[in-house]
Image (cartoon, rainbow, N blue to C red):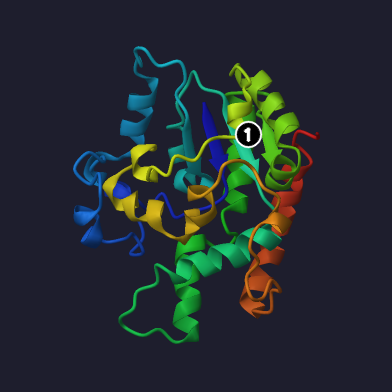
Amino acid sequence: MLATTPANVGPRWGPESESASTPAPRATAILPSAGSAYDSSIFTHAWVKKTLEAEHKNASLVLLKDFALSLAGKEYMDHLPHGYHHTFLIRNPNKVIPSWRKCHEEWRPSKPLLDEEAKEEWHKANMGEHGGFKDLLELFQYVRENLDPAPFVMDADDLVSQPETVMAAYCKVTGIPFSRKLIEWENDGSPMYEKWITCRDHLGYLNCNYHTNARSSSGFRKNEDLPKPASTSVTNPKAIEQIAKCVPYYEKLYRERFVP
């Protein structure tokens, strides 16, 4: 089963990298689990497809999450594995873009110092012009036309406001037995690198601000229940411009979503 979301760089990771924004191996060698994580030199689209389509003995479920930008372009979409349910998680770009830009500040190179124009180029290189939403819509259309006539789409706001209803529907479509452990879980404090398999270049992301709330979570929580930043208003003209470019693609996907 594949769950696809609208963000991240790429097809720019590993040996198929097309972007200078790929994180250098720098700190990954000293991160926990660096020795067992996949090496990015083998992490090609073809290798992922072959690995996922192989037999997984004693596994009741194989779950993979990736971003639509990682499969941008039909030549990469053709590497989608067969035999999986392809599902989509969407989120309002008015929430995605400001949050994403903030997270990128954590990974922006400290040297050389970047002026405002260079900072915007950094954001664009990592987020793409349409923040991944155009790629997400194109991927959804590809899946519907080639793999699944009715791929499941869920909206993040629906998921956090009605988690039991949405996850029950998700489980019904994918054939996963529903359990309340899917919406409420015990947080044992173990680090994310012990729970998820990833490649070395991504190990650092498991400990960054992208996942702050996820690391401490014990269930789905509405946005209003979470700590709010000092300012939640979007005032950056470039961010406002990018949001406007994303909205039409999001709205098309929103019309395809499961309605609780």
Q: Is residue 195 left or right of residue 26?
A: right
From the top left corner, tell me how far across and down residue 32 is, in percent: 25, 48
Q: Closest to the observer: 203 or 79? A: 203
Q: Residue at x 61, y 35 (%)?
A: 184
Quarter containing the C terminus? top right
Q: Closest to the observer: 187 or 100? A: 187
Residue underneath mark 1: 183
Q: Is residue 132 left or right of residue 204?
A: right
From the top left corner, tell me how far across and down residue 231 is, in percent: 67, 75
Q: Residue at x 62, y 51 (%)?
A: 134
Q: Secondary structure at mark 1?
A: loop
Q: Number of marks in the image? A: 1
Q: Closest to the observer: 182 or 238? A: 182
Observer able to see residue 150: no
Determine whether 47 is above or below 198 in the image: above
Q: Amino acid at mark 1?
A: Ile
Observer able to see residue 19: yes
How many residues crowd mark 1 within 10 Å: few (<14), some (14–19), many (20+)?
A: some
From the top left corner, tell me how far across and down residue 158 is, in percent: 74, 42
Q: Residue at x 53, y 69 (%)?
A: 102
The answer to which image quadrant residue 3 occupies is top right
Q: Is residue 77 left or right of residue 176?
A: left
The answer to which image quadrant residue 196 occupies is top left
Q: Residue at x 61, y 67 (%)?
A: 98
From the top left corner, tell me how far across and down residue 115 is, in percent: 44, 87
Q: Closest to the observer: 90 or 125? A: 90
